[in-house]
Amino acid sequence: MRPKRKQRLIFITILFLGFSSAAALGVYALQKNKTYFHTPAEIVAGNVQQDKLFRVGGLVVEGSVNRFSDGVTTEFDLTDTSGTVTLRYKGLLPDLFREGQGIVAQGKLNADGIIIAQEVLAKHDENYMPPEVADALKESGASHPDNIPKKNY
């Protein structure tokens, strides 16, 4: 091989290895930071690992909101009509949070089967529902908050 051709081949090889390394690091970083979305039915079925961060969406069950005496901890049930899970959130809930509305929460499942939420997001008006929640409700047959079960005490 001629020196110029050899030099070009080495340059292309180094360039290829550099781009490959950058792509591999990028994929690794994205894998580590991704958060899966699950429905209450999937959680009840046991498809979620404990202590792994995930998102859950559904409708807040009527009559299930329980505010603790510390003033900042709230526990409530979330349903997609196929399954119901309990969430516990320590902090201030969004102003628009209320029973019968769609929410998305991010948190981890504890050993007792309760989701310890780190973040709770509520819809911003009466016509909006997070896409994940809307899709989960359509799959389960309930497309409107009036179709969710009410908790009886």
Image: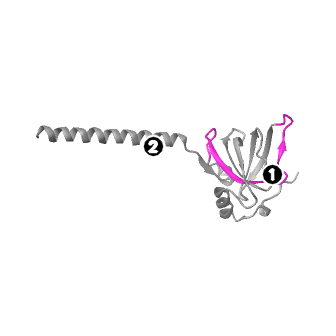
- Would you identify the image quadrant in which residue 72 lies? top right
Residue for point 70% across, 65% down: 141
Residue shown at 62%/46% (left/top)? 48
Label drawn at residue 98: 1
> With 17 as the anchor, is 100 left or right in this view?
right
Q: Is residue 116 above or below residue 151?
A: above
Using residue 48 as the reference point, say whether residue 58 is left or right of it.
right
Tell me where the magenta segment starts and ends, as one range: 48-71
Residue 127, given in percent of the width and then of the height, sits at 73, 61
Magenta span includes 91: no
- At which x and y percent is residue 38? 63, 51
- Where is mark 2, residue-wise? 27
Which amino acid does the dot numbered 2 rest on? Val
- Dot 1, crowdedness within 10 Å: few (<14), some or many (≥20)? some
Q: Residue 71's quadrant in the figure?
A: top right
In the foreground, 64 or 4: 4
Magenta residue check for 57: yes
Residue count near mark 2 (Cα–Cα under 10 Å), binned few <14, some 14–19, many ≥20 = few
Q: Secondary structure at mark 1?
A: loop
- Identity, as a three-letter code, of the amino acid under mark 1: Arg
Give the main secondary structure, helix, strand or loop, of the magenta stretch.
loop
Disc 1 to disc 2, C-alpha distance: 39 Å
Q: Mark 1 vs mark 2: which is more N-terminal?
A: 2
Q: Quadrant of the N terminus?
A: top left
Please give left or right for residue 19 compared with residue 140 in the image: left
